[in-house]
Image (tube, helix red, strand yellow):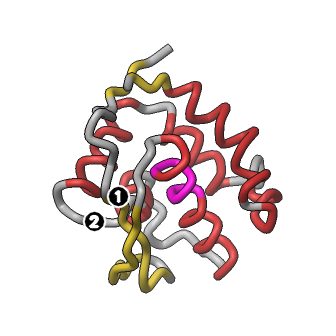
């Protein structure tokens, strides 16, 4: 499957708030949201985040925060959960991963985060710019 980056952003803007009503106010909310949009529209960064999840078994939240230099950004508990939900939506609802596991992920105020696995066998994801 080839995923155009604008598709990820479009899916986040339309589908995320329907599934995660609690976090619907996160969309267009400021610095964290802006960095999510920048990230999903960067093919190389998304490939690296996916590689970290799949091969290195590092939850996507960690490389996201590090790549965007947000490891010391003041985040609330709600911010932590919203960013986790965003990556859950991307990996499970857009990329098609079937399972997730909570792991230690000490960065910023985050102590645990999910990594995703059981990507469909026929779902080799390639990113392309539009």
Q: Nearer the viewer, residue 96 or 15?
A: 96
Residue shown at 26% from the left, 40% from the top: 121
Q: Earlier in the sequence, mark 1 or mark 2?
A: 2
| Quadrant of residue 116 within the rendered picture | bottom left
| Quadrant of residue 43 within the rendered picture | top left
| Quadrant of residue 86 within the rendered picture | bottom right
Q: Nearer the viewer, residue 62 or 7?
A: 7
The image shows residue 17 at horizontal and vertical percentages of 77, 52
Q: Give the extent of the magenta segment.
A: 86-91
Question: In whole angstroms, how far apart are the C-alphas of marks 1 and 2?
Answer: 8 Å
The quarter in which the N terminus is drawn is top left
Kind of element beneath mark 2: loop
Q: Nearer the viewer, residue 69 or 26?
A: 26
Residue shown at 66% from the left, 42% from the top: 12
Q: Which residue is mark 2?
A: 58
- Whether 108 is among the magenta residues is no
The image shows residue 34 at horizontal and vertical percentages of 64, 46
Marking on residue 79 = none
Kind of element beneath mark 1: helix
- Whether 90 is among the magenta residues is yes
Q: Is residue 25 above or below residue 16?
A: below
Marking on residue 63 = 1
Badge 1: how crowded within 10 Å, few (<14), some, or many (20+)?
Answer: many
Q: Nearer the viewer, residue 67 or 54?
A: 54
- The answer to whether marks 1 and 2 mark residues whose Cβ atoms lie closer than 8 Å is yes
Left or right placement of residue 44 versus residue 19 in this view = left
Badge 2: how crowded within 10 Å, few (<14), some, or many (20+)?
Answer: many
Left or right placement of residue 8 versus residue 113 in this view = right
Left or right placement of residue 75 versus residue 90 in this view = right
């Amino acid at each position: 499957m080839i995923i155009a980056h604008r598709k990820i952003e479009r899916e986040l803007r339309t589908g995320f708030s329907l599934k995660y009503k609690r976090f619907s106010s996160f969309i267009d909310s400021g610095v964290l949201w802006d960095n999510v949009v920048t990230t999903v529209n960067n093919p190389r960064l998304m490939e690296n985040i996916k590689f970290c999840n799949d091969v290195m078994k590092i939850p996507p939240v960690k490389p996201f925060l590090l790549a965007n230099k947000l490891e010391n950004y003041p985040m609330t508990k709600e911010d932590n959960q919203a960013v986790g939900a965003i990556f859950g939506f991307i990996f499970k609802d857009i990329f098609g991963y079937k399972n997730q596991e909570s792991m230690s992920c000490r960065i910023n105020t985050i102590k645990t985060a999910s990594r995703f696995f059981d990507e469909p066998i026929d779902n080799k994801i390639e990113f392309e710019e539009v």
